C-alpha cells in the first residue's frame, strides 16, 4: 500500500516536514489554496546569536485572495544576497557550512518568477541533498480541482 502526505509549501520548512516526506511514497504540495499573508509560506527564522531573526521572501502583489500558485516573487536579488550574508555571519564557522551554503545558494539562484516554482525547486533540492526517495507533485499541476471546496477536493 502506498502512503501519501500533503502539505502547503514553505520556504526552508522545519525538520518534521522532511520527516513526513521521508515516511511517504508520494508527497503532494498543496499549492492551489489561498496564500496566507504573514504565514510561513514565504517566511522563516534563523538563530542569530541565540535570538530568532525573521526573514521573508518578498512577493509582488501578494494577497489572501490569490492562490499560492498564482503568487509572484518580487524582482531583484537584494533579498537573496542579504539572506546569504546573514547565513554566512551566523553559520560561517559551522562544520558543514560549505555544503549547506552551496545548497542554499543553488536554491536562491533558481530562475523562477512565481512562488510555487521557487518553493517546489527548494523542496526538491533539499530532498535530493537528504537522499530521500519520495515522489513530489503539486495539486495545481496534477489534480486541477481548485474549484472544489473542502472534502470535495
Image: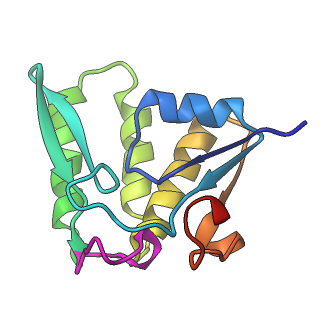
Main secondary structure type of the part rendered in magenta? loop
What is the basis of the colouring in this image? Answer: rainbow
Residue sitting at x 35%, y 54%:
41
35 shown above or below 131: below
Query: Number of labelled discs?
Result: 0
Residue sitting at x 52%, y 59%:
121
Residue sitting at x 31%, y 77%:
65
> Can residue 153 be seen at all in this image of the molecule?
no
Q: Is residue 140 left or right of residue 11?
A: right
Residue sitting at x 55%, y 59%:
30
Q: Residue furthest right?
A: 1
Q: Is residue 119 left or right of residue 53?
A: right
Report the magenta residues as a range: 60-74
Q: Is residue 77 left or right of residue 142?
A: left
Q: Position of residue 120 (x, y in %)?
A: 52, 59
- The C terminus is located in which quarter? bottom right
1 or 107, which lies in front? 1
Q: Position of residue 50 (x, y in %)?
A: 11, 19
Q: Position of residue 22 (x, y in %)?
A: 66, 31
> Can residue 137 be seen at all in this image of the molecule?
yes
Is 114 inside the magenta-drawn segment?
Answer: no
Amino acid at each position: 500500500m502506498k502512503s501519501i502526505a500533503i502539505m502547503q509549501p514553505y520556504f526552508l520548512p522545519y525538520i518534521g516536514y522532511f520527516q513526513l516526506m521521508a515516511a511517504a511514497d508520494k508527497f503532494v504540495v498543496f499549492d492551489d489554496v489561498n496564500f496566507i499573508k504573514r504565514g510561513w509560506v514565504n517566511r522563516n527564522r534563523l538563530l542569530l546569536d541565540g535570538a530568532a531573526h525573521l526573514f521573508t521572501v518578498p512577493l509582488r502583489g501578494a494577497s489572501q485572495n490569490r492562490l499560492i500558485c498564482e503568487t509572484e516573487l518580487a524582482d531583484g536579488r537584494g533579498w537573496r544576497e542579504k539572506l546569504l550574508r546573514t547565513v554566512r555571519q551566523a553559520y560561517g564557522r559551522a562544520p558543514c557550512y560549505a555544503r549547506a551554503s552551496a545548497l542554499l545558494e543553488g536554491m536562491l539562484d533558481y530562475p523562477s518568477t512565481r512562488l510555487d516554482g521557487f518553493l517546489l525547486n527548494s523542496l526538491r533540492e533539499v530532498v535530493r541533498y537528504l537522499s530521500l526517495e519520495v515522489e513530489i507533485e503539486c495539486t495545481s499541476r496534477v489534480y486541477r480541482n481548485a474549484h472544489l471546496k473542502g472534502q470535495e477536493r
